[in-house]
Image (spheres, rainbow, N blue to C red):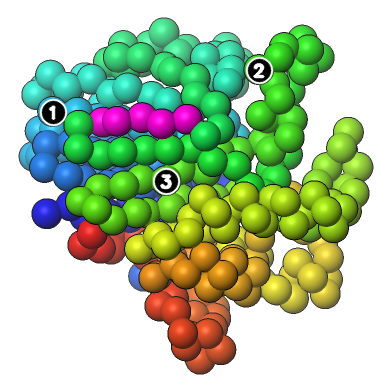
Amino acid sequence: MAYLKIYGTNGSQAGPEGSNKPKLGTNTICYGIFNNKEVVFLDAVSGLIKASKELLELEPEKITIVLSHFHHDHIDGFLLAQMSYHTPYGTKPNIYGPPFIKEALKKRFAPLVSPCSIKSLINIESFNEIEENQELIIGDIFLRTFTGGYHPPSLDRKLKKDQRSRLLNNHGVLGWIVEVEGHRIAYATDMEFDYKKINDKVVPISKTERQRRINNYITAVYGSKILIADGQYTEDEYTTQGKYHGFGHSYPEQVIGLALEAKVGKIIISHHMPTRTDKEIDDLETKLRRKFSQIEINFAREGDIIQI
C-alpha cells in the first residue's frame, strides 16, 4: 500500500531538535511517497537526512528526488544525507529539478560556502533538468510538473540570457503532481500570487496575471486527494501588516480557498515559519478547521504517515 511520510515541515531554516516545535518537528521541507520498492522525495533539505537513515531498512529499488527550486532551504540536505555518498543496498538516487540544476548545486556546494563540492556526492546517479508541464514515470508512480504562483529566483547576468531561464524568471518554482494507486497528491510550495520582486523591488501582480496564475494552480491540483501547500505566514502578517510581500510565500486562508475551488480532499499546510511554536500552530489549525469545515485541514507534522 502506498503512503506519504513527512520528514520535514519548516520553511527557511531548521531548528535544534525539540526546541520551539517538539510536536511538529524542526527539520526543513522533505516529503516521501512510498510505493512498494519505489520512493519519491519531494525536496531535499534536513528532513532528507532522517529519511536517508530509514532507507537502510527499506532497501528501495528506485529512489527519485524532485526539487521545486534551488533555494538553500530546499536543497541543503544533499550535503549530509547518507544516500548522497553510499547506499549499501546499491540503489542510487536520480534527481530532477528546474533548469540550471547542476549550475545551482555547484554554486551551493562551492568552495568558501561548502566543505565539499557537488563532485563529492558520488552516489547520485544523475541530475536532470525538467520544465513545466512535463511528465515522469518512476515504476508505478507518475509525476507531472506545473507552475502557478511566483517565487523570487536569483539568476546572474549570464543565466538570464539563457533561453532556459524563462521558467525561473516567470515563476521561480515548480509544483509537482504525483499519482500513485489511482490517487493524486499535489505539492505546491513557495508560491505567491499577489506580489513579486523585480530587481529587488516589490511590485503587485496585475489582476489579469494573478487570475491566470490561480487558474493554472487550480487546474493542476484539481481533484487531488492531498494538497501539500505553503502557508508560511498568517493572514495578518501577509495582508494587514504587509511585511512579507514579495518573499514568495502564501498564508493558510489563501491556499485553503484555492483547495476548495479545486475540490481537493485534504490540505496539508507546510513550510512553517521557523519561529512559530507548536501552540501557535495548534491554535491556528483549530481556528481554520472551524472556519473551513468543508475540507480536511492539517498542519504538517514531522513523522506523520498518511495512507494513500
Q: Residue at x 59, y 53 (%)?
A: 217
Residue 46 x %, y %: 41, 42
Q: x, y (%) of residue 308?
A: 23, 59
**In which quadrant will I find the N terminus?**
bottom left
Would you call the spot at circle 3 few (<14 residues within 10 Å), some (14-19), or many (20 or more)?
many
Question: Which residue position holds label 1?
Answer: 61
Residue occupied by mark 2: 164
Label pair 3/2, CB-CB below 8 angstroms: no
Q: Nearer the viewer, residue 27 or 146?
A: 146
Amino acid at pointer 2: Arg
Q: Is residue 94 left or right of residue 9?
A: left
* Above-or-below relation of 258 to 297: above
- Amino acid at circle 1: Glu
Alpha carbon separation for disc pair 3 and 2: 22 Å
Expressed as whole percent of the image width and height from the top left, the position of residue 9 reads 44, 56
Answer yes or no: is residue 15 visible. no
Which residue is found at the position 13% from the left and 28% from the top?
61
Give the SS element for disc 2. helix
Report helix, strand or loop for mark 1: loop
Q: Which residue is tagged 3? A: 177
Q: Secondary structure at mark 3?
A: strand
